[in-house]
C-alpha cells in the first residue's frame, strides 16, 4: 500500500480563500491537488485519492520504473491493467 513516505508536498497556496496543496508521488509526475488546513491533512487526502484510483506499491514501482526510463506511454493505464 502507498504511504506518506511516497508523497512530497510541492507547494501550498491560497485559492479563493482556501488553503490548497500540490502533492506529488515521489519518482513520478503524478500530482494531487487537495484542499487542506495542514500538511498532514494534505498528505492524508492525497493518500486517500491514490488508494481510490487503485495505486499500490506494485503499481507505483512499475510507474517509477517506466518514468525513470522516459517512457511516454500512458504508463498509469498500462500499469493498472496488469
Image: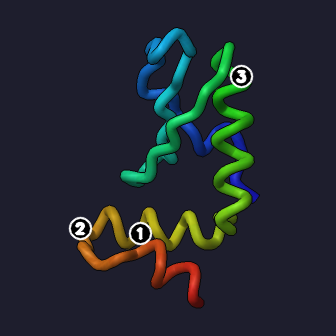
N-term-proximal mark, 3 vs 2: 3
- Numbered mark located on residue 40 in the image: 3
Indicate the position of residue 21 as horizontal and vertical percent values: 52, 25
In front: mark 3 or mark 2? 3
- Numbered mark located on residue 54 in the image: none
Front residue of 65 and 35:
35
Q: Quadrant of residue 19?
A: top right
- SS at mark 1 in the image: helix
- SS at mark 3 in the image: helix
User: What residue occupies the far bottom of the structure in this picture?
Assistant: 82
The residue beneath circle 2 is: 70
Indicate the position of residue 14 as horizontal and vertical percent values: 47, 12
Tell me if mark 1 has few (under 14), some (14-19) or many (20+) residues whose alpha carbon lies within 10 angstroms of its own. some
Indicate the position of residue 8 as horizontal and vertical percent values: 52, 33
Q: Residue at x 47, y 15 (%)?
A: 16
User: What residue occupies the far front of the structure in this picture?
Assistant: 16
Q: Is residue 6 above or below residue 73?
A: above
Q: Residue at x 45, y 45 (%)?
A: 31
Tell me if mark 3 has few (under 14), some (14-19) or many (20+) residues whose alpha carbon lies within 10 angstroms of its own. few
N-term-proximal mark, 1 vs 3: 3
Q: Are marks 1 and 3 in contact (CB under 8 Å)?
A: no
The residue beneath circle 1 is: 65
Tell me if mark 2 has few (under 14), some (14-19) or many (20+) residues whose alpha carbon lies within 10 angstroms of its own. few
* Quarter that holds the C terminus: bottom right
Q: Is residue 25 above or below residue 23?
A: below
Amino acid at each position: 500500500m502507498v504511504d506518506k513516505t511516497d508523497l512530497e508536498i510541492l507547494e501550498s497556496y491560497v485559492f479563493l480563500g482556501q488553503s490548497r496543496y500540490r502533492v506529488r508521488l515521489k519518482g513520478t509526475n503524478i500530482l494531487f491537488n487537495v484542499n487542506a488546513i495542514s500538511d498532514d491533512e494534505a498528505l492524508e487526502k492525497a493518500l486517500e485519492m491514490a488508494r481510490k484510483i487503485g495505486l499500490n506499491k506494485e503499481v507505483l514501482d512499475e510507474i517509477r520504473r517506466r518514468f525513470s526510463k522516459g517512457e511516454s506511454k500512458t504508463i498509469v493505464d498500462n500499469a493498472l491493467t496488469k
